[in-house]
Image (cartoon, rainbow, N blue to C red):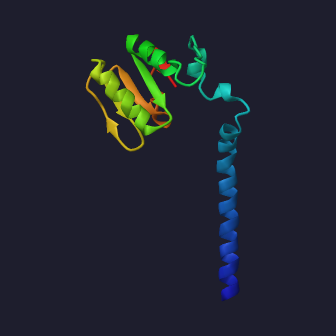
Amino acid sequence: MFHKRFVRYGLLRRQERRWIMQSLAGVEWCVEFKEPEKLYPRARLSRRKIIYHAGPTNSGKTYWALEALKRSSNGVYAGPLRLLAVEVFERLNNDGIYCSLFTGQERREVPFSSHASCTIEMVPTGKSFDVAVI
């Protein structure tokens, strides 16, 4: 009796492994990043201007990037930390620019907001933005 249960368990495990391997075949393509240009075809077709700010600490890189964000008709700030996203959210709203906040912990949607401040993993990828500060 023990032997039959073991054999049945072994067969289920084999079927489960086969299903997992088939499922992972599609995931493997995304994870390896051999062809990242195929991941976001719509983004690849859009014409963009990329500005890279480099400089020492406290040289105004973030300040000038946020000034460009304020001047734009719509934009997004994508920060590495929740507190930075909250700080930019509060700064933009205090300056009269309607801005929503999206983090893993909270979601504050401001009606008629044209800007968003979020942590990098919460960036709304389905929208187009004039300015994105990363």
Residue 62: horizontal and vertical position, in percent? 49, 21
Locate residue 111 relative to residue 9 in the image: left or right. left
Residue 71: horizontal and vertical position, in percent? 39, 10
The residue positioned farthest toward the right in the image shown: 34
Where is residue 50, by image quadrant? top right
Locate residue 19 relative to residue 133 in the image: left or right. right
What residue appears at the point 25 percent right and 25 percent down from the top-left corner?
111
Where is residue 97, by image quadrant? top left
Q: Height in image: 20 above or below 87?
A: below
Residue 8 visible in the current orientation: yes
Residue 3: horizontal and vertical position, in percent? 70, 85
What residue appears at the point 65 percent right and 43 percent down from the top-left corner?
27
Which image quarter holds the N terminus? bottom right
The number of callouts visible is 0
What residue appears at the point 53 percent right and 19 percent down from the top-left corner?
59
Residue 17: horizontal and vertical position, in percent? 69, 60
Locate residue 122 relative to residue 26 in the image: left or right. left
Q: Height in image: 26 above or below 60?
A: below
Residue 73 visible in the current orientation: no
Q: Height in image: 41 above or below 47?
A: below
The residue nearer to you, when weighing 127 against 12, is 127
The residue nearer to you, when weighing 51 against 19, is 51
Locate residue 3 relative to residue 41 in the image: left or right. right
